[in-house]
Amino acid sequence: MGKKRSRSRYALASMIAVGGLTAVSAVPADAAVTDNKTYTVEVTGTNVGTGSTVWAGDTNATITVKVTNTSPSQSLGSVNLTLQAPFALGSAIKVGPNTSADAVPGDNIVQMRNLGLAAGGGSVTVLLTVDVRTCTATTGSFAINAKQSNDYNGTGNDFYPLTTTTSVSVPGQCQLKFVGQPADALRSTTITTVDYSPGPGVDPVSVEVLDAGGTQRIGAFTPVTALKLELATNPGGIAPSPSFLPATYSAGFATFAPQLSVSAFGYSLRPTSTGLDLQPASGLFDVVDQHVTCAGSGGDCPKTDPVSKGGVSVSTDFGTGADPANLTVSVGAGDAPLFNCGAAHPRTPTTVVSQFVFTPTTGGPAPEDFAEDRTGTFTVSFPDASRPLNTYEVCWAAPYQFQTDGGSLTQPSSVLKPGTTNQYLHVGLLPDCKRGVPLPCVASRSFTKATRTESAKITIVVNADGRDPWAY
């Protein structure tokens, strides 16, 4: 034992933020004293399997703690290393150089005994496996106490400072990932993972919280704010904060029951929560006003009931066909008014775009090979009595060439079909149906007024085939 000194606390000479190395040095406040029991602590960390010094999101991080005896004359015999929240000790293995020393983990304390660290530079390094899993930025610490005695007992043999605290910062880097992607849905019904199936008994839209490596679910994560979905693409122009927030959350897994009130093609959703990295948006999905399933092998396609919006109604009546298909019908779709038929036929503020779309059912032809062979009618009715019937014309848009009312064939326009990146629409005024005129064409225009108080109704019927047209 060296000469006993007063037990005053010593100042910390440096505190370097963790980013590869943290060094905390214990230096006597009285520089004239030369026989102080002092030590230093170095902390380094790596992500298991990545070599990164960022620990966030890992289930376990490998961290080394090196204790060096800087006393000029006294040996250092024992150390207690305590991990403080949010870190939890997984295991501790002494890696040297004193192979006979003990390093025993327990209750977040690593007990190093019988070290015998020689004065003037003897050291011991302990390899810790520490749970630093956190999805939000936080700071934890290691508290280190050292004694001259080998068994950590007795008084008057403490090394200074009595407690050295080393801070470790962990940025939140967990991820959100879709487990159940949103599928096509009817307007104002619950969007699930199955097309046009609001439930019950259908898997909901869902996401999970993953670690920084994107491989393990973080069940212990508690969102800082409610985990929610936001619109990543919004072709329908829906106002912010729609009705599908927030989530039902448990153990790193969240489910949603979103609904969208505007029919449009090409919506997508993104899960968010404060403190978590934003993840890629969901796949694109459509919201429509009406859906029916058409049987194949000569099966019928059910007639759709009129769907209405703003006084305008749309219905379809298609017959039998060889291919099974989904038929969707919408009126006033938010993403549809992208085209017009020239300066002589401008869209007015009251123009409503309506549409019907055939797509293959699951198990049917591949989308690129799908050519629905059904023919039928597309009917639009709306209250308007301000102009003669023969002034009402139909501006038609479709991903195929057709004959216009002037007798010419359309050419691709500069307008992309919503939800695609390379499918340009053909646009033009439809001719009236007569001998030799191919589909699509205007079959009839009619004017009705059932009572004196009822608004006049204009109805236009288009004969068309099932090749995915749009019309208004």
Image (cartoon, helix red, strand yellow):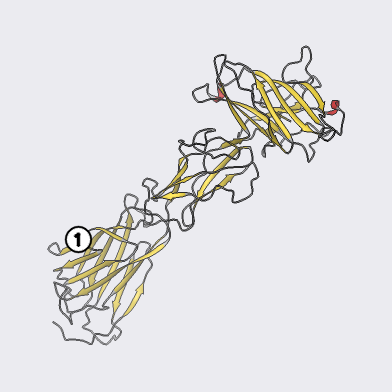
Q: Is residue 6 left or right of residue 226?
A: left
Q: Quadrant of residue 86?
A: bottom left
On screen, 446 above or below 198?
above
The residue wearing badge 1 is 94
Q: Is residue 26 left or right of residue 410?
A: left
Q: Nearer the viewer, residue 384 or 4?
A: 384
Residue name at image x 57 percent, y 23 percent: 325
Any part of residue 97 in sight: no
Report whether 151 appears left or right of 139: left
Task: From the top left corner, tell me how far across and down residue 388 is, in percent.
Answer: 87, 28
Q: Position of residue 129 (x, y in %)?
A: 27, 57
Q: Number of callouts in the render?
A: 1
- In depth, the one of 157 and 125 nearer the eye is 157
**In terms of secondary structure, where does tag 1 sit?**
strand
User: Quarter-wise, where is residue 13 in the image?
Assistant: bottom left
Is residue 77 in view?
Answer: yes
Disc 1 marks a residue whose amino acid type is Lys
Give the residue furthest to the top: 435
